[in-house]
Every structure is written in structure tokens, then in C-alpha cells.
Image (cartoon, rainbow, N blue to C red):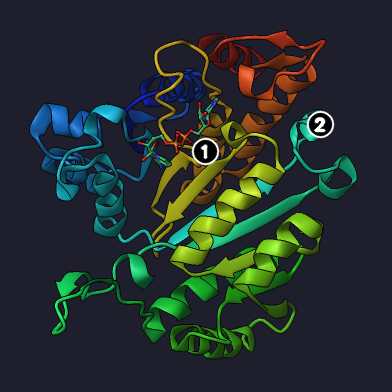
Amino acid sequence: MKIAVLPGDGIGPEIVAQAVKVLEALRSDGLKIEMEHAHIGGAGYDAAKDPLPEATLKLSKESDAVLLGAVGGYQYDNLPRPMRPEQGLLRIRKGLGLFANLRPAMVYPELVNASTLRSDIVSGLDIMILRELTGDIYFGQPRGIRTLDNGERQGFDTMHYSESEIRRVAHVGFQIAMKRNKKLCSVDKANVLDTSMFWREIVTEVAKEYPQVETSHMYVDNAAMQLVRAPKQFDVILTGNIFGDILSDEASMLTGSIGMLPSASLDSNNKGLYEPCHGSAPDIAGKDMANPLATILSVAMMMQYTFARPDLSQRIEGAVRKVLQQGLRTGDIYEDGKQKVGCAAMGDAVVASL
Ligand code: NAD
């Protein structure tokens, strides 16, 4: 297992160090794991004046999987756009062809009170949001700011999806649904957008190849409402890049803390980039306060999706559950009566229970 380790900025290095401890523990059990570190985001800019240095992309291409912390920081906010940390993320996703972004939103029984929603609405929640990651309005050309004939300035972007882009992500969605509760809801805005009408047409065609899966379609505005009204109606949500960006953040809050949520971004051969859903949290960086569990759970996803070792994935998830049962909590998921621990202590506890 050759893994590129890209800690990035802010809390990135702290949380990634805990996930690396977990990988080292698996290695000491006899697993052949090779890890190499490289810079991305602001750290890439500091080291090589590029948020995705060439050496980082090369290492990532040569690896089976990439473990990433987070990117971004106040000190980079005024850089020109191509130099900004977030560009490193967009470019590595594109450069590795990572078109399928999997974001599970699960509520652990121990954390049911951490959600801002009533516990009866979220307890037992287990949904998977599959977001297309390399197309849509985030990458469409032309885009820019132009001056119209009448002298007024106008900002513009282009939304488009090609048939092959929709087909390949739809197949991933149906295959995931087949391994879960066999329900897939495709989310679009087909009542207004032509791109969405086309999306719906192609998803409907692909659905015919998976007759066991109960397929439905929902407009994104309704989906945003249903996610907070009755989220347990969903199993797999399949959607495009911009809708998925927004809905997956919304879904993350159903679970209480963004510090608990892992993600996987896969190419067509299950090579993947694994990272927590949250950002670099500059407000708590360097204070040993960050929750490393989302990053550790990202390693669990790596074992499942890239290395096809569900046994190891379950072992890591089991270790995380155990520390939660023991009452250990970082600040973001703390409640009265529990034991507050820092980032490194949480990582050590997971390794101990592993
Ligand atoms: P953020 O996710 O970094 O932080 C939002 C809030 O959640 C903060 O209060 C933070 O302290 C808290 N938080 C986040 N992760 C946590 C963890 N593991 N443990 C405990 N608390 C945690 O989002 P933001 O504040 O909007 O953005 C900060 C920076 O991160 C920006 O530069 C942004 O561009 C970047 N960002 C990066 C990614 C990424 O790398 N994938 C994603 C989102 C934002």
C-alpha cells in the first residue's frame, strides 16, 4: 500500500499525524504500508510558490492512495486566485481524475445529542452522498467577469455535464446503493436547468441496469428541505458538483460535528484521495484541540475502497466507536460528564483500542 501523505495547512498536520499513527499501528501488525509526505495548499505555496507543487502531483500519481489533511489559512487569503490553497485541491482532484466524491453522514449513538436536530430525527442516520467532483459549473468554460456593450460589468460561469460524466458517476452511485439499502435519490434542478434535465435523462437510463435499486429524483431545493425534515428517508444521494457541495455540508451538520466526517474521492480504478470533510480550522490550529476522528475514519474508507480490505476498515471504525463509548471527546463533540481530550490523546486512544 503506497500512500502519499499531504498534511496541508492549519490543523492539517495535527490531524494527519493521528491518522499516520493508525497506519503505523497497522504496519506494525505486518501490513506492507509505505508512506511519503509532500506539500499542498498554503504549505505548497510556502515551499514551492505553488499550491500543488509538481513533485506533490507526481508522488500522488505514483501512489495507490492519497491521505490529505486540509488546506487554507488567513495568510493566503489575498494571494491571486491561481496561487490560493483551494486551487491545490481543485487541481489534484482534476489531475488524478477523481470524479466520485463519497461523503457518508452517520450518527454514532454516542453522539446523538451533538446534533442540532432532535434525536428522534437523526438517531440511526446513515446516508451516503455521492457528489460528482470534476465537472459542472465549477469547471465549465467560459467563465469570468466581462464588460457588456452597454458598459455594465457582468460575472458569468458555465454549467455543463457531458453524457459520459453523468454515466460514470451514476454507475458508482448504483453500485454503492447495491451494497447498502438499495435506494438511490438523484438530486437535480430539472425544472429550471437544461443541464439538470439531461442529468435526469441519463440517470434514468443507467437506473434500468440496476432494477433492484429503488430510484427516485428530487429537486435540489426540496432535497435541502427534506434533509432537515426527515433525513432518514435517504440511503444514497447522487448529485452534481455544486449541489453536492452544498447538500453534503448540510448533511454533515445532521451528525453534530464536522470533525467526525470522512470522505473519499475516487477515480475509475478506485484509486482515491481521502480527507476529512472539514477545512483547516485556522481558529484552533496548533492548539491540540482538533478532532482527528474524521481523518482517521478517512483511513477506514481508504482500506475499504482503494485496498478492498473491509476487515481493516471495520477494525478502525470499531476502534473509533470504542473510544467514544469510553467517553473520550474532543472539544467539538464534548458534553457534560465526558472526558475532554486533545487531538494527540484522541489519536493515541484510537491506536490503543485498535
Ligand atoms: P472549517 O471547516 O475549517 O471550520 C469551520 C468550524 O469548524 C471552525 O470553527 C473550526 O474550528 C471547526 N472545525 C473544523 N474542523 C474541526 C475539527 N477537526 N475539530 C474541531 N473543530 C473543527 O471551515 P472554514 O472556517 O470555513 O474555513 C477555514 C479554511 O479552510 C479556509 O481557508 C477554507 O478555504 C478552508 N477549507 C478547506 C477545505 C479542505 O481542505 N477540504 C474545506 C473547507 C474549507
**Mark 1 within 8 Å of ligand 1, using the beta carbon:** no
Of badges 1 and 2, the one in the foreground is 2
Residue 1 is drawn in which quadrant? Answer: top left
Label disc, if present, on residue 272 of the rendered structure: none
Report if residue 171 is visible in the image.
yes
Left or right of 179 in this view: 112: right
Identify whether 309 is placed above or below 30: below
Residue name at image x 63 percent, y 70 percent: 221
Q: Mark 1: give few (<14), some (14-19) or many (20+) Cα within 10 Å.
A: many
Is 327 left or right of 87, judged from the image as shown?
A: right
Tell me which corner region of the image, top left, top right, bottom left or bottom right, holds residue 148.
bottom left
Mark 1 or 2 closer to N-term? 2
Identified by mark 1, the residue type is Ser
Q: Residue furthest right?
A: 120
Position of the C terminus, as image quadrant, is top right
Mark count: 2
Q: Which residue is mark 2?
A: 113
Is 91 drawn above or below residue 35 in the view shown? below
Q: Nearer the viewer, residue 93 or 351?
A: 93
Whole-number angstrom distance, CA of label 1 to CA of label 2? 23 Å
- At mark 1, the secondary structure is helix
- 294 in relation to 283, above or below: below
Tag 2: amino acid: Asn
Residue that badge 1 annotates: 298
Q: State the image coordinates of residue 87 (x, y, percent, origin top left).
A: 25, 48
**Front residue of 281 and 269:** 281
Residue 75: % across, % down: 24, 27
